[in-house]
Amino acid sequence: MSRIIAVTSQKGGVGKTTTAINLSAYLALAGAKVLLVDLDPQSNATSGMGLEGPERSHLPDILEGRLSWERACRSTPIEGLRCLPSSLHLQVPIDERQARGTGVDLLREAWTSDEAALDFVILDCPPSLGPMTDLALGLADSVLIPVQCEYFAMEGLAQVLARIRQAEQELQRTIELQGLVLTLYSPETDLCHDVAREVKQFFPQETLETPILRDSTLAEATSHGKPISLYDTRSPGAWSYMNLAKEILKHESQTRTRA
Ligand SMILES: Nc1ncnc2c1ncn2[C@@H]1O[C@H](COP(=O)(O)OP(=O)(O)OP(=O)(O)O)[C@@H](O)[C@H]1O
Ligand SMILES: [Mg+2]
């Protein structure tokens, strides 16, 4: 049984892709079988993993049953981590009909089946609430929302949460909130503490304990097409994502024990 987590926020540049790449890497390094899915036509997760996407997006073929997701997957230098790349064509490759079609349920079933042998599927979403985010919510068990420790951090959060509730009604099932993760965290600034306090005040249960420190090594690693675990394991960014993976693994094992 796998857990499908959509990393989403309609705000741009809050650390969705950096989180999707590095969380996937550390989950795999902890022994989990992980699939990182790039759902953003910007293809940042694909290039950030050092991969080149296909000429044309494979998503429509996968959703229409013409191509298996396994065949579209690429291996990565990290054992246990595969990636379903996006293509660099910037237009959204699917429409609303495909984002809510039966292909979505079939893909979700395939990923959660025993044959797929996946522990986690991590979906990197674009900064919009369009068809790709609808698709991600249709596939996801839970949503991880990066919240940048900056002015207006809370802005837009209500909108994503409302979109999740709406998707739950359309899909007739629950989508859990995996958590809000504080990103680009600079402990030396007052603003950062103020934002963290405000977010925790509004979302005491939902805010994850691990903040992701602001660390330019993370940006460097991505520009070299590597997760931070293959670039600089001693950097603050590496520690942050290793701890985030641990926190999520702990939460999952507690949830499974209770179930
Ligand atoms: N913790 C961090 N410390 C320093 N730089 C970071 C950190 N997280 C992300 N960045 C950098 O900030 C920029 C935006 O990050 P990222 O691409 O992950 O955000 P995003 O939410 O996926 O953006 P988009 O909405 O465009 O998809 C990138 O240049 C990235 O390298
Ligand atoms: Mg991104």
Image (spheres, helix red, strand yellow):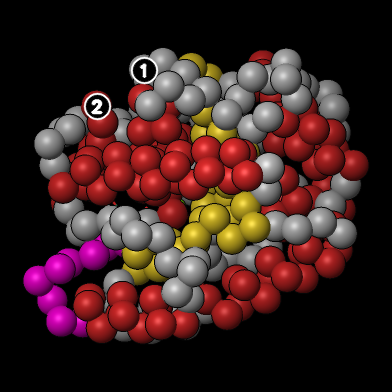
Q: Is residue 179 left or right of residue 78?
A: right
Please, is residue 84 above or below residue 215 in the view?
A: above
Please, is residue 118 above or below residue 88 in the view?
A: above
> Which numbered tag is attached to residue 53?
none
Residue type, mark 2 in image:
Leu
> Circle 2 sits in a helix, a strand or a loop, which is it?
helix
Q: Which residues are magenta?
A: 183-191
Q: If the picture is divided into quarters, which one holds ligand 1? A: bottom left
Q: Residue at x 72, y 20 (%)?
A: 114
Q: Marks 1 and 2: CB-CB under 8 Å?
A: yes
Q: Position of residue 232 (x, y in %)?
A: 16, 33
Q: Residues within 10 Å of mark 1 (few under 14, many from 20)?
A: few
Q: Splitting the image into 4 quarters, where does residue 65 fall?
A: top right
> Which numbered tag is attached to residue 230?
2
Q: Residue at x 76, y 37 (%)?
A: 108
Please, is residue 227 above or below residue 174 in the view?
A: above
Residue type, mark 1 in image:
Pro
Q: Residues within 10 Å of mark 2 (few under 14, many from 20)?
A: some
Q: Splitting the image into 4 quarters, where does residue 63 fall?
A: top right
> Which numbered tag is attached to residue 77?
1
Q: Residue at x 12, y 36 (%)?
A: 234
Which is nearer the eye, 102 or 28?
Answer: 28
